[in-house]
Image: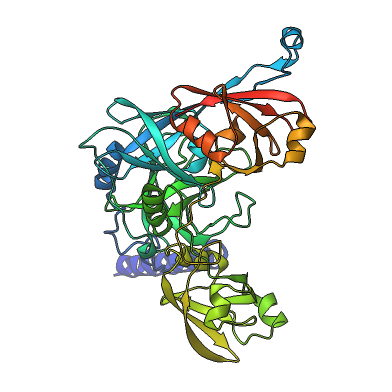
Amino acid sequence: MKNATKYGWTFVMVLAASFLAVLVYSKYFAKPQIVTVKETPAVRYTGFPGQEGNLPDLTFAAENTVNAVVHIMTQSVRGGWSSGNPWLDFFGYRQEPQVAQGFGSGVIISADGYIVTNNHVVDGAQKIRVVLNDKREFDARLIGGDQTTDLAVLKIDEKGLPYLRYGNSEELRIGEWVLAVGNPFNLTSTVTAGIVSAKARNINISGDRSSIESFIQTDAAVNPGNSGGALVNQRGELVGINTAIASRTGSYSGYSFAIPTTIVHKVVEDLKKYGEVQRALLGVEIIGVDAQVAEEYKLDKIEGVYVANVTEGGAARDAGLKSGDVIMSIAGKKVNSNAELQEVVSQYRPGDEVKVTVKRDKSEKQFTVRLRNKLGDTGIVNDSQIVFGAEFETISDREKSKHGIDRGIMIKKLGSGKFKSAGVPEGFIVTDVNKRPVYDVSDLKRVVSGARGGILIEGIRPDGELAYFVFGAN
């Protein structure tokens, strides 16, 4: 019994000691545990519909395009003049012609060999060579070029060629995928992809107020040699002609610009049919409406295009438009910039009638305007005094007496073409072509139309010095 009592007290003491030890440890040695409950949200990339978003398949468009895009090589002879004295020429008072090479791209637009490219690619070229994607080569002839839109049409003699069909560039949407196909740095059949970044861009690349610019802006890579190449949509339809890049180095640095097919198609048809573009004019001086213009002219909204002046005897004035009107739409198409207005009007010819909606005194009015040409009428323009981009005029008897000649025609204005590329200056008097005398423009045209190979131009510089120039006939 005593042993049982002894063991009982021992058990109680051990239990009490254990309890005391636990109490001391928990108070002075144990560290509290903190339990954190976290909830992880579902995360996905923005801009994609769930987990099933895919980039568009552009292989069909690429395969449909590459065989219709060509490589263009040009050769031109520039400069070259003589003192007119063989003795002085022998001692260096002359300059030999210089041969220049160029390259670019073009787009076949018909099975019988019509090709559209940029005017600056072939401007002044005496020889044009076209290389197809299958490596076949052809000599090309220039059907016509237009400096105002920077477009030109070539022709090669071949049938059954692959070609691109026109798409509607007006249907392009900002953010839509497009392909640029061309020959940058002489690398044939190069395809790059990008999106439409903007439309109706005017970048004043030529510095000429008469230029028509309403570019499609994309971020597809375009480099030297791409000029004249194709911009196509996902269906492989031609929607633009690649023309320029925004760059400080001359190479691609983010944005490129293409001429929309709304402009291209009409220019091409004019050059094929008339040899030059039949440009319709509205007869207004316009200002794009921004916040500053709206405040200055007290306009209630920033929209449309402000009419600063209407040309005396022009189409707009005769139809009833006035200075101070704000043009809202032309032919049912809204215009909110100078570029958009130019693009719409450029699709028409002199004599065409269009509906013009304007805002005047906070109310809208509609007028029917019959568009006119640069001469102020509605007829077909044929610049009979222009040859190879140079505008000629007959010279007076006084000029003939001054220079001791009995014939000649003078270059009044020098536009884009072979005379300019060869270095012939404005004011130059042409007296002979290919050793045949020139009394008027018809003489010049007759000789050059029948020329094969080179053309020798002889005459008198504005400073009275005799000189000659040489360039190719084709």
Question: Relative to residue 436, is residue 79 drawn left or right?
Answer: right
Q: Position of residue 413 (x, y in %)?
A: 65, 45
Figure label count: 0
Residue in the image at 58% along x and 81% along y: 326
Tell me: 166 left or right of 463.
left
Residue nearest the observer in this picture, 151 or 162:
151
Residue 357, placed above or below residue 446: below
Q: Quadrant of residue 92?
A: top right
**Residue at 50% across, 73% down:** 335
Residue 402: percent from left, percent from top: 79, 33
Scheme of image coloration: rainbow
Residue 123 in view? no
Q: Depth check: 192 or 45 in front?
A: 192
* Point 30% across, 31% down: residue: 133
Q: Give the vertical position of 81 relative to 305 (above or below).
A: above
Q: Position of residue 374 (x, y in %)?
A: 55, 61
Percent of width and height locating residue 79: 64, 25
Name the image quarter holding the C terminus.
top left
Quick check: can you spot residue 236? yes
Residue 68 vertical placement versus 451 (above, below):
below
Which of the pair 294/261 is nearer the observer? 261
Q: Quadrant of the N terminus?
A: bottom left
